[in-house]
Image (cartoon, rainbow, N blue to C red):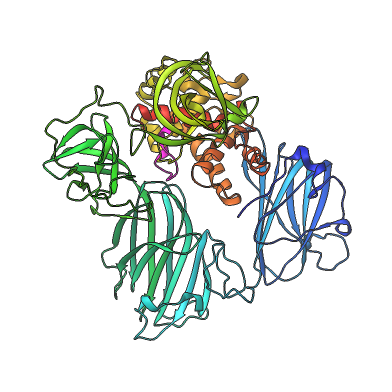
Amino acid sequence: MTLLLHHPRLAMLNDNSFNSNHDTLQTAKSVNLGANSKSFSGSLDRNGSQFFSFRTRNRSSLQADVSSPDGQVNVSLVHDADQNGRISRRELLSNSRPLSSSTLGEEIQSISAKQLPEDTYFLQVSGTGEYTLSASLTGAKATNNERSGAFSSRGLVASNGQRIKNKNWNASFLNLSRRTVRDYENYDFSQADAVHDLGDRGRKGRIAAKLNFNFGRRNSPEGVRRNNFAMEAWTRTGLAKGRFYRLTSTSDDGIRFLFKDRRTGEALAELDGHWNNRKLSDAPYTQLVSAPKGGAYDFTVQYYERRGRSAGNVLLERVDLEGAVASSALNLRDNPSTVGTNAVDVLSQGETFRIVRQVQSSNDSTYRNWYQIITSDNQQGYVAADASFVDIIGEADQVVTIGGDDPIPVDSTVPPDPAIVPTNPVVPTNPTEPITGGGSDSSQGFISSKVWITSDDKIAFRNDKNISGVQLGRLSAGTPVTILGEAVGGRYLNDFDLWYNIRVDVGGTTQDGYVAAYYVERSNFDGTYGTAISKNNGSYAHHIDEATHARLDPKNSSYRPLIESAAARYDWLAPSVIAGIGSRESAWGHFLSPKGPTGTGDGGHGRGLMQIDDRFHQSFINSGLWTDAKSNINYGIDNVLSNYYDYLDRVTSLEGKDLLRGAIAAYNAGPQSVLNAVNQGLDIDHYTTGQDYSWDVLNRAGWFQTHGWT
């Protein structure tokens, strides 16, 4: 669902903006609400009110949020049942409740109502100051050309006429015979006998989706027979690029799974599961899956019930994996390919390592899938993702790949076996240097929107890796570049010192030169954040030293286990990102007064390592727990960052890295600032401190990754 929001300062210039302050029901602004959220901005004098009227159909469901910089505005749902133009207590159906408050004090109030009968209703916005109201209404009937149960990227239309959210379980049912109930090849859910909403997908922390249903022995959903029926339930959920997810299920009777393209409905992976008559007490089905591209997918559960109890439990959750060498020896390579790559080390049989993610080779048609790993001595590299070479400890060795990149043309050259040690392996002078590219010595990239913070929205392309180098041209956001290599050079911005040697078209001529690495994004994001900070940059050494050794904290020997534990609760969050936030906020205690976890910053308002603001998180501050490193880190992640991530996931169309950037930017400037930037076509960081907060955090995260952080 896409939100179109309006910055408060522009309220008077917008058709959806209002500034009358003591409206009545008779002067309410009539608005047409639908499944896509609409937004309206305005300003209220002291204790003012504004009304918006809307019409419902077919027992609709309402969702409305109001945000205000000063946190002094709320919203109520009103039904003028007796049509006298006045509001009695019984006509006040619901009041909003606080959803979250940002580090800048901006508050979001939320209200929801389900099964509203067909009639006219009012939203009353009350309080003082500027506000933005966002509202959506679901429940319209299916149009003539949209069958109940037919594929829709927006979510199905249920049997009761309501549109089901695509983040809920959209369930279609077929009444079949004993002979046909197991024949999934001939299921046609576009002709469903019933469609029902089975509730929220249950995404939280590391859980990407979960479904629990129990229709019992005699009860079944409306329109569905007790025995011999089939169900297909799907929900949309995000999968981190290359990360691993464990699918676990129990059922009575058969169950199988698909992952589908969210735009076309095409099946990208099918898992047979346990497609037979079974009981809940039988051994669970488990399978590891990974999505090389990452992004949002429609996770689909197919189930059939023959007779007796009908129930199932499904869990899709992100997991961390460890592997061991299964072959006599295994090459650790500098890129995910056996074609034109070097062996940086040779791993012995039984040697264990951490598997970071699965990636796909861009040029190796024989060994397409690879594991990016970190060895016990902190070397990073790639090994072939093949069960004959790698045992996944404690799991089934096979990982099902969801989708993937375009097929690689088969070359007549047969690549070497990745498990065979070359006679004279080529080993770099520093085999522990982390890998920054993938596939070949050069990679594709583009000039990022970070250049929008410069005076002319462009960045200099120079003949040398220094700001004093001769300027060969200026590159704007989106300009494609070929990255030939990277080099440490002159410092710029916040003591950044990494430069890219690039090839780019300037005025119709292809030229080689240098550009500050901070302003370049690699085209294929693999979970490794680019950085403009060289590994041995002394300006940031005390940041990672403190995060690793906690020298300023007598209670802890390291913050790293606390950081990794906090990140492990969320499938979208890496420890390196938390490390980047702590680096930006407090240099892990070095920027505070006094130095360490009990110090303050931001004029005394920012408390502790994660700089929790005492003006807007008073209960936590008053508890005194902010001085404890573990409590401070957990609060910053669980009560601030994750709340903003979930909120932006719900009300915007941001996905993947952009959604993560949005949550990080909101940590600094509040979610409304992020929504304003997106609505105005600006970079997500536009209203953050320095207009670079999330970019800088991810830049620091990339630097932590060069030191072995994931």
Q: Is residue 570 on the magenta stretch?
A: yes
Query: In terms of depth relative to the viewer, which is nearer, 97 or 322?
Result: 322
Please give left or right for residue 245 compared with residue 149 in the image. Answer: left
Q: Position of residue 116 (x, y in %)?
A: 69, 67
Above or below, 90 relative to 708: below
Can residue 553 be seen here? The reply is no
- Quarter of the image where one finds residue 80: bottom right
Q: Is residue 55 left or right of residue 678?
A: right
User: Does the segment drawn in magenta span residue 592?
Assistant: no
Q: Note whether 65 is above or below 531 in the view shown.
A: below
Count numbered badges in the picture.
Answer: 0
Residue at 37%, 18% in the rendered image: 536
- State the image coordinates of residue 474 (x, y, percent, origin top left): 57, 26
Decide if residue 431 is on the left or right side of residue 502. Answer: left
Question: What residue is shown at x 13% (from left), y 30% (from top)?
Answer: 424
Q: Is residue 690 above or below residue 279?
A: above
The x and y percentages for residue 481 are 47, 34
- What stretch of residues is rendered in magenta? 567-576
Name above or below for residue 267 compared with residue 510.
below
Q: Position of residue 393 (x, y in %)?
A: 22, 47
Q: Residue at x 32, y 69 (%)?
A: 280
Query: Is residue 386 among the parts visible in the rendering?
Result: yes
Q: Quadrant of residue 162?
A: bottom right
Location of the C terminus by quadrant is top left
What secondary structure is the stretch in magenta mostly built from? loop
Front residue of 253 and 508: 508
Quick one: which residue is furthest to the front in this view? 509
Q: Quadrant of the N terminus?
A: bottom right
Image quarter of residue 78: bottom right
